[in-house]
Image (cartoon, rainbow, N blue to C red):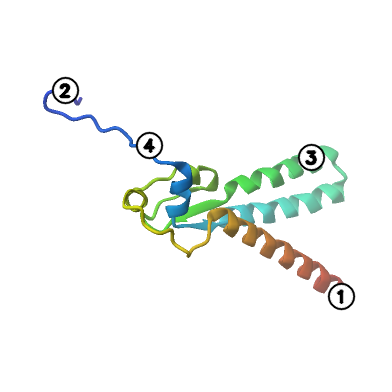
Amino acid sequence: MAVFDPDLDTATYATPVERLALAEQQRLVANPLLAVVALLGVWALFRYSLEVRNLYLFFATAFAAVVSALLIQYHCLDCGHTDFALRSRRHACAPVVHRIRIDAEPHLLPPALGTQIKAWTLAAVVAGVLYAILHHMG
């Protein structure tokens, strides 16, 4: 059991960092793999719920589709940390805080996490539309 001695030990407190500056200096990459796998399961369950005409299963599937968006993750290029995208605003690793303190210019690449998630969503919608078009043509 560790004992804190105020004469010998120094307390370490988290230094406050402005959220806007934090978002500008973060180098995060979106990772939608878990959400995509969950949506594939939701799609199969959705088709099954329509086959058996079960309204409760349909609503549960719609709820699962909404919840699967929460499974999008991010990966920090500075420290290697991976977590859910909802927690990305609180991620302040040492390299990010250092760049904020020396007032470094924001990085151009990768784009902001929200932009990456919107791009992944657009790509998934386009792929789904193309699949639907090509599937019904043949």
Depth check, front residue: 126 or 107: 107
Q: What element carries label 4?
A: loop
Name the spot of residue 108 as percent of width and height, x first.
47, 64
Q: Which mark is residue 137?
A: 1
Relative to 118, 80 lies left or right: left
Q: Which of marks 1 and 4 is in front?
A: 4
The residue that mark 2 highlights is 6
Name the spot of residue 131 as percent of width and height, x first.
77, 69
Q: Give the CA separation, mark 1 to mark 4.
A: 57 Å
The mark that comes first in sequence, 1 or 4, is 4
The residue that mark 4 highlights is 16
Depth check, front residue: 121 or 19: 19
The amino acid type found where label 1 is placed reads Met
Relative to 63, 114 lies left or right: left
- Label 1 packing within 10 angstroms: few (<14), some (14-19), many (20+): few
Within the image, what quadrant is residue 55 found in?
A: top right
Q: Quadrant of the C terminus?
A: bottom right
Relative to 64, 137 lies left or right: right
The mark that comes first in sequence, 2 or 3, is 2
Relative to 32, 24 lies left or right: left
Q: Quadrant of the N terminus?
A: top left
Within the image, what quadrant is residue 58 found in?
A: top right
The amino acid type found where label 3 is placed reads Phe
Within the image, what quadrant is residue 121 found in?
A: bottom right
Name the residue rendered at 71%, 50% in the picture. 42
The residue that mark 3 highlights is 59
